[in-house]
Amino acid sequence: MATVSISVNIFLSLEGRWPQANLYSQFCYDILYDILPDQDRDVFVDIKLTHHADGQAAGYCRGDEDEVYIQIARNSCDVPYTHSELARNLAHELIHAYQFITNSPKLESEAYGKENILVEKYWAK
Ligand SMILES: [Zn+2]
């Protein structure tokens, strides 16, 4: 088996009252190490869980090549997301994080296309 060296330094912070925060943080690290290029640099990813998001959206992502800010909604229209829905929404926003960090086009199609693959691969494994 080949040895893979990953030198991108991910500084992840989860804010808000995450249920099973360790599971979600491991999920984020697994996805980010999978999708981010192997570059010798620091990347800051700040993920905040809020009661809901503007427009009852599942989440938002903004940032640049060095720092990304993600908001994940716990509820939409006062209905809480299940854990697997939260994981899917998180995977979706992490694909947008990749797009900011690599300065790639911000394609919704890419985010929707890959979210379930990442959940299948990394959620609660
Ligand atoms: Zn999106």
Image: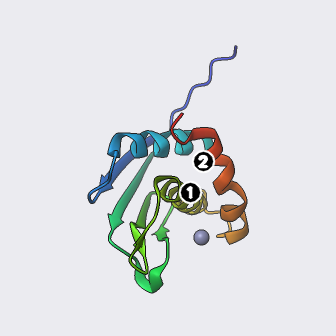
Looking at the picture, the colour scheme in use is: rainbow
| Residue highlighted by disc 1 | 88
- Percent from the top left, x then y, of residue 83? 46, 53
Quarter that holds the C terminus: top right
**Residue at point 34%, 62% (across, down):** 48
Mark 2 and mark 1 in contact (Cβ < 8 Å)? yes
Q: Nearer the viewer, residue 96 or 57?
A: 57
**Element on which disc 1 rests:** helix
Query: Which of the 4 image quarters holds residue 52?
Result: bottom left
Q: In the current view of this chain or complex, which residue is farthest to the front?
A: 79
Q: If you read the primary sequence from the N terminus, does the residue marked by circle 1 or circle 2 appear first?
A: 1
117 is higher (above) or lower (below) than 59:
above
Which circle marks residue 118 in the picture?
none
Q: Give percent across and percent down for residue 33.
A: 55, 39
Question: From the viewer's perspective, is residue 89 above or below residue 38?
Answer: below
Q: Is residue 46 visible?
A: yes
Quadrant of ligand 1: it is bottom right
Foreground: 102 or 60?
Answer: 60
Q: CA distance from mark 1 to mark 2?
A: 6 Å
Query: Residue 33 vs residue 110: left or right?
Result: left
For disc 2, the marked residue is 119
